[in-house]
Image: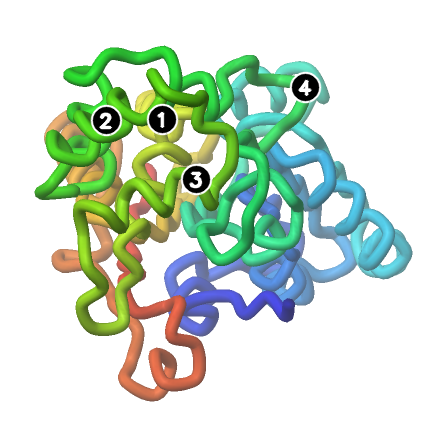
Amino acid sequence: MKHIPVLKDEVKKFLNLKNGDFLIDGTLDGGGHAMSLINELGPEGIFLGVDLDESLVDKFKIEFGDYLKKHLKKFFIINENYANLENILKRNNLPKAQGLLIDLGFSMWQIDSGRGFTFLKNEILDMRYSQKLNNVVAMGVINKLSENELAEIFYKYGGERKSRQIAKLIVRERKIKPIETTGELVRIIEMVKRRRGKSHPATKIFQALRIFVNSEIENLTKILNSLDKVVDSDGRAVFITFHSLEDKIVKNGFKKMAEKGIAEILTKKPITPTRDEVLNNPRSRSAKLRALKML
C-alpha cells in the first residue's frame, strides 16, 4: 500500500528549513515526509529519523539509506520512541534541532503487518508498534481488564458512545471463550453497533485499543514537556494529529509553552487539508496541523 504524506506542503512551509539545518522526523513511518524535506537541508544538513516500529525503520534504511549517504553530511535512523528524543540527542552527541515533525497518523504499512491493527482482516489481537518494547497486547487488554476499565478506554481514547454496552458484551463473551482475534472482536462490536455511513462500527474501538496498548497519549505528553530540550531557539516544531484528544493535548501543550514565554504559536487555528487533498487521500480527512517556534 502506497504511503501518502498528509499536509506535505504545509509541513514544509511551517518548518521553513534552510541549508545546513538539523531536522528530526520523530515518526518516520514510510518516509514520505522525510524524503520531501531532506533536500531542504542541503549537503551540510543533518537528519534524525525515529520510529518505534522496527520493521518501518528497516524498510526506510533499505529504501533510502544510500540516498541519504549521498545527500547529507550526517544522518541517524533509530528504532525508538519519539518520546525519548531528549535522551536520543544526548546519546548521539547531537545538538537541538532546527526542525521537528511529529505525525501521529496510523501507518498504512502496519495494516499489512499481521498484528491486528485492522478490522478488515482476521488476525491475532496484538496492536503493538514494537514487538520488543511493549509487553501489553490488545488480546490481554480485552480478556483481562474489568468492564469499567474497558468502557473507560473505549470512551476516553475512541470517543465511543456505546462503550459500556460493548464492554459489557465483551466481558460476557470472554467467559465463554477468550477473545483472541480481530474477527471475534468485530463480531461482538457488530452485535451492539450497526454500520452507518462510511465508518465501520469497529473503528473507534480499534483506535482506542491501539492508543492504549502503545501509550500514545503518555508519549505525546512527554515530548511536549521536553520540547525545549529537543528544538533549538528559533527552531520549529510541527505536530499532525488525527483525533480530538490528541489535538487537545497538543493545543494545550503549545499554550503552556507560549504562556511561559519559551515559544510562539504559529497556527492560531489548526491547519486542515484542502478539499482536493481529502479527495486524493481520504485518510487525510481528520488531520490537523499545529506549529510553533521556540524562542
Q: Earlier in the sequence, mark 1 or mark 4?
A: 4
**Residue 118 showing in the rendered view:** yes
Q: Is residue 224 left or right of residue 177?
A: left
28 to 261, vertically: above or below = below
- Which residue is depicted at the point 45% across and 34% down? 231
Q: Position of residue 158 (x, y in %)?
A: 23, 40
Which residue is under mark 4? 132
- Which residue is depicted at the point 59% across and 66% down? 3
In space, the residues marked 1 and 4 are separated at their CA atoms by: 17 Å
Q: Earlier in the sequence, mark 2 or mark 3?
A: 2
Disc 3 marks which amino acid?
A: Glu
Disc 1 marks which amino acid?
A: Phe
Which residue is under mark 2? 153
In space, the residues marked 3 and 4 are separated at their CA atoms by: 26 Å
Q: Position of residue 128 (x, y in %)?
A: 55, 30
Q: Earlier in the sequence, mark 2 or mark 4?
A: 4
Q: Secondary structure at mark 2?
A: helix
Q: Earlier in the sequence, mark 3 or mark 4?
A: 4
127 to 47, vertically: above or below = above
Circles 2 and 1, Cβ within 8 Å, touching? The answer is yes
Q: Position of residue 226 (x, y in %)?
A: 38, 22
Circles 2 and 3, Cβ within 8 Å, touching? The answer is no
